[in-house]
Image (spheres, rainbow, N blue to C red):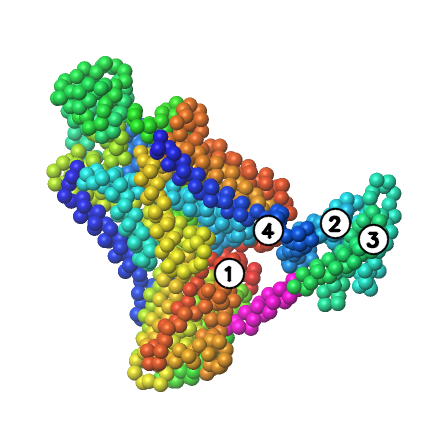
């Protein structure tokens, strides 16, 4: 899909983001509009900003891709991404706001009065931020490749450069407006094409066999295999081949493939006929996604619960989400904001599964080429075609870039802030710029090294680390008065650290198989209890280290602000 | 497999960094081997042990600090048991013979009263208890006995008496330093309270005069102004808490500007540009209003034409950046430097130096005011306010919409 509209659409999104970011401030010149200029951000605006920052490439592209490849089981992803805010609402939102903390390290320091725990929390913020940035950059690379045929890494580099430039120049002066704008942009970019796609589907006779196994081709389709892969056939199939199959060269030959496994070399073109079942593929390059998918297929229950735990409990530890709550004027507003976020995100997540289901009907070959994440981008052109399809495709592409930009800039600011405050030696603007560059350079380098991870999966790993390190810290810090600094440090190190190692091994394509692989690929189910248990046990073992002002601190976390003022007065 | 290795490196690097940092923190220069003669070596060892015992004691004599330092002190003296007491009970007992606690406290009454050390024989029923003698050395701060250091040994020894006396004196010095630290903290707190801004008397006189001038001609306007005046004074006489939010401070500034505008009319124009993200930031009470007051004074001073003041508050990540700028008469930078250094007292009002002092007290020396000015070139005052600072919490709540 090399449409001429996509690149201007992407450029437009970037320019609009920069402009809203630089000039979106309220300015007052007379007395009467003073109240407008100094009005705090209301729950709905702040909720749109949080949603805008939160809905990343994983939500915009990844979920549809996973639903396309693996079917309705993957609907747990949107459910988990949304329900995380329910946990946040119930246990964390208001007390976190009342703590006065801006970042997670701030919270650790406010609650435990320990610089060491603060620094450890900072290290985990950087780790989670980098893990989360990685799939954003990869998603950008994929999008640009699909749109223009540019090399794989170019999109990631563009997003990295744009975000670093904006953040380092202090261009996000009205970040709340930018992110709220991005939310509505993303919603529009998915909703409008989805309406047209559903109409096209209706016009096509509304076929309902989207989740039939296996999916079938609805028309004759040429599939180009970019990476060498192993094709698994349940039953014999006749295809037309140009390229190398099972080590034999073919030139536009009709070939009957027997049931079993066949190796397709790269740059081979396969032509499937209408009604052919879509074969399943095994990437021969040792990439992660098939083996992760495989172990998911082997242990669906374990994988599902691992995913649920990671997403439910991981949301509260996302560094870029937490800082947005500071904008709420008080604890009650923070709660209202979270309720609004639930509504906005819940509405958004109805759309990606629609793309996934339609993708199974109209672009099933994406499961073969490993570009399933591109389903959202390809569907408008595939189903509608012509100028209309191109325009809708451009709209989707713009929305996808909005997703990369907003999440990446929020994460970069959070990571750069921690790097500047707690890691780099002296303070100052120059150091913030250095921190920004560092915050972006590491995931960019990593994205060049490790590849081939479906974006929704990669984001799930970041959630797992966050759930195992920050969830125990926040929940116990807010609700348990006997938490001690050594306990918090040990829990974060053991829970978060082990999840981090498991994630690292998974991302690196840990060669082992079987139960070990499943344990490493969905660490949350064991690492979250491990984190909680360590934190509780070590805290109980060090009762002398409970910070002196704990009672007063917890009272401040839990008392509504009105009462607090009266108590003090 | 190169992808596997690279990924593993990426995953392991942060953990390595954390381990390195932890290791550096916990590592102690234990081995001093190869440093000079045995005598020098022993000296180093002693000084090193003493320096390790010092930091906990700098926080005063409590159970926790005593526990942390007692082990080092016992190493220093080389005795079987060492205990630190305050005036009434044993804070920590390090070493063997814990059952002597009560006996020691009984015998301590004398030394604690006189402030002189002594050695006495311990009575003990346990046949295997090695402690037969106790050496008491009082800990004194400013000639007042705060507690005692007791070293217990199997036999009487003049060396131990001398050594215990010296160590007790060294501990006393540490406690005196702790005392000094405490009084310094109290001084800073008192200073913050004393610096707590008051509104200038001139402003009250001028405001009342302006309101009086409207009472006959425009009673409605006079009423409004009186209410603004009431709001502003209520805010500035507020007693609870040393901190407020940027939103509340801006509202106070708005009330203040309404009163000033009534006096100067069209001569004063104000532009506000506030990023809503920074409105919840907590900051010292009345620390921006004096800056605005200063800008008004400088802007309108000695000239009859218009003055423009702009107030901006920007969000810069972990900090809020507040800039107050006027296009008035400006100031000689050298004079300003001397005013801020406290060499020259400013003419009337609580000026910039008060705000500067308080910001430094609360946020540290890196957060003083930045002032750009020259004669005839206006003045631009920049304040950086961290969004989070331990101990800084606004007492009140934000104004309801």
Chain for numbered disc 3:
B
Report the Cα–Cα distance between label 2 and label 1. Answer: 46 Å
Which mark is first along the chain, 3 or 2?
2
Residue farthest to the front? B37
Quarter residue A387 falls in: top left
Whichever of callouts 3 and 1 sits on the residue coming sooner in the sequence is 3
Quarter of the image containing the C terminus of chain B?
bottom left
Residue B190 among magenta residues = yes
> Which residue position is annotated with label 3?
B157
State which mark lies toward you, 4 or 3: 3
B120 left or right of B67? right
Q: Quadrant of residue B130?
A: top right
Question: Contact (CB < 8 A) between labels 3 and 1?
Answer: no
Residue B113 vs A540, above or below: the answer is: below
- Camera-near label (4 vs 2) is 2
Highlighted magenta segment, given as a residue range: B178-197
For marks 3 and 1, give the one nearer the viewer. 3
Q: Residues within 10 Å of mark 1 (few under 14, many from 20)?
A: many
Q: Mark 4 points at which residue?
A: A547
Both labels 2 and 1 in a single chain: yes
Residue on which the image places disc 1? B392
Chain identifier of the residue bearing label 2 in the image? B
Query: Which element carries disc 1, helix, strand or loop?
Result: loop
């Amino acid at each position: 899909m090399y449409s001429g509209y996509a690149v201007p659409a992407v450029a437009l999104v970037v320019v609009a983001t920069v402009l809203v970011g630089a000039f979106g401030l309220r300015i007052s010149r007379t007395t009467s509009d003073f109240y407008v200029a100094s009005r705090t951000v209301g729950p709905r605006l702040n909720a749109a900003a949080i949603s805008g920052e939160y809905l990343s490439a994983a939500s915009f592209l990844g979920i549809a891709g996973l639903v396309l490849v693996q079917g309705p089981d993957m609907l747990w992803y949107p459910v988990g991404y949304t329900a995380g805010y329910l946990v946040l609402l119930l246990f964390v939102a208001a007390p976190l706001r009342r703590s006065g903390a801006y970042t997670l390290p701030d919270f650790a320091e406010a609650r435990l009065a320990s610089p060491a725990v603060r620094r450890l929390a900072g290290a985990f913020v950087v780790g989670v931020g980098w893990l989360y940035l990685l799939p954003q950059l990869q998603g950008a690379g994929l999008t640009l490749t699909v749109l223009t045929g540019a090399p794989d890494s170019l999109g990631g580099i563009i997003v990295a450069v744009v975000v670093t430039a904006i953040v380092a120049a202090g261009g996000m002066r009205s970040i709340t407006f930018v992110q709220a704008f991005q939310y509505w942009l993303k919603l529009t970019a998915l909703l409008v094409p989805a309406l047209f796609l559903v109409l096209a589907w209706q016009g096509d006779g509304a076929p309902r066999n989207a989740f039939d196994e296996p999916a079938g081709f609805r028309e004759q389709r040429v599939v180009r295999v970019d990476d060498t892969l192993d094709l698994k056939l349940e039953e014999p199939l006749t295809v037309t081949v140009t390229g190398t199959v099972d080590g034999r060269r073919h030139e536009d030959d009709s070939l009957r493939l027997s049931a079993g496994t066949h190796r397709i070399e790269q740059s081979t073109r396969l032509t499937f006929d209408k009604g052919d079942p879509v074969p399943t593929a095994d990437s021969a390059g040792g990439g992660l996604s098939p083996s992760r998918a495989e172990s998911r297929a082997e242990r669906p229950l374990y994988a599902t619960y691992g995913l649920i735990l990671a997403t439910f409990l991981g949301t509260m530890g996302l560094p870029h989400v937490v800082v947005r709550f500071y904008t709420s004027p008080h604890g009650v507003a923070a709660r209202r904001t979270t309720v609004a976020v639930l509504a906005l995100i819940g509405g958004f997540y109805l759309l990606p599964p629609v793309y996934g289901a339609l993708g199974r009907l109209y672009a099933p070959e994406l499961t073969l080429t490993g570009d399933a994440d591109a389903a959202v981008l390809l569907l408008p052109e595939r189903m509608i075609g012509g100028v209309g399809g191109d325009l809708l495709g451009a709209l989707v592409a713009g929305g996808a870039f909005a997703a990369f930009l907003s999440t990446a800039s929020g994460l970069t600011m959070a990571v750069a802030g921690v790097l500047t405050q707690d890691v780099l030696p002296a303070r100052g603007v120059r150091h913030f710029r250095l921190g920004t560059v560092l915050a972006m350079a590491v995931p960019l380098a990593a994205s060049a090294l490790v590849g081939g991870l479906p974006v929704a999966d990669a984001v799930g790993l970041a959630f797992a680390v966050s759930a195992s390190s920050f969830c125990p810290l926040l929940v116990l810090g807010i609700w348990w008065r006997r938490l001690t600094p050594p306990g918090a440090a040990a829990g974060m190190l053991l829970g978060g650290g082990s999840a981090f190692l498991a994630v690292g091994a998974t991302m690196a394509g840990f060669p082992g198989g079987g139960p070990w692989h499943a344990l490493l690929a969905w660490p949350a189910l064991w690492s979250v209890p491990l984190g909680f248990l360590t934190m509780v046990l070590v805290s109980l073992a060090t009762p002398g280290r409970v910070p002196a002002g704990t009672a007063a601190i917890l009272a401040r976390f839990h008392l509504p602000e009105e009462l607090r003022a009266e108590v003090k007065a | 497999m190169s992808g596997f290795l690279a990924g593993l490196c990426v995953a392991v690097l942060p953990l390595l960094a954390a381990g390195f940092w932890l290791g550096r923190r916990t590592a102690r220069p234990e081995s001093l081997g190869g440093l000079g003669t045995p005598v020098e070596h022993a000296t180093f060892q002693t000084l090193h042990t003493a320096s390790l015992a010092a930091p906990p004691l700098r926080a005063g004599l409590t159970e926790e600090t005593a526990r942390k330092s007692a082990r080092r002190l016992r190493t220093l003296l080389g005795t079987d048991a060492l205990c630190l007491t305050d005036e009434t009970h044993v804070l920590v007992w390090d070493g063997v013979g814990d059952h002597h606690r009560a006996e020691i406290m009984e015998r301590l009454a004398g030394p604690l009263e006189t402030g002189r050390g002594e050695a006495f024989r311990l009575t003990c029923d346990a046949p295997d208890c090695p402690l037969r003698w106790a050496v008491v050395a009082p800990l004194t701060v400013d000639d007042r006995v705060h507690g005692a250091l007791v070293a217990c040994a199997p036999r009487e020894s003049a060396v131990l008496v001398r050594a215990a006396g010296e160590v007790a004196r060294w501990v006393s010095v540490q406690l005196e330093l702790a005392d000094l630290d405490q009084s310094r903290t109290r001084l800073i707190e008192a200073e913050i309270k004393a610096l707590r801004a008051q509104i200038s008397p001139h402003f009250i006189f001028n405001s009342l005069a302006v309101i009086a001038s409207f009472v006959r001609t425009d009673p409605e306007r006079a009423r409004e102004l009186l209410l603004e005046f009431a709001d502003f004074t209520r805010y500035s006489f507020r007693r609870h808490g040393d901190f407020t939010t940027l939103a509340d401070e801006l509202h106070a500034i708005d009330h203040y500007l309404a009163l000033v505008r009534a006096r100067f009319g069209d001569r004063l124009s104000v532009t506000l540009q506030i990023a809503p993200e920074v409105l919840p930031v907590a900051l010292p009470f009345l620390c921006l209003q004096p800056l605005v007051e200063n800008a008004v004074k400088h802007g309108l001073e000695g000239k009859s034409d218009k003055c423009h003041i702009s107030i901006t508050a920007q969000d810069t990540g972990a900090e809020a950046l507040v800039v107050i700028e006027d296009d008035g008469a400006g100031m000689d930078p050298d004079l300003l430097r001397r005013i801020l250094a406290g060499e020259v007292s400013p003419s009337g009002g609580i000026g910039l130096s008060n705000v500067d002092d308080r910001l430094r007290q609360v946020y540290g020396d890196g957060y003083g005011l930045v002032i750009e000015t020259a004669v005839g070139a206006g003045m631009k005052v920049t304040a950086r306010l961290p969004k989070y600072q331990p101990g800084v919490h606004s007492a009140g709540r934000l104004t309801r919409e």
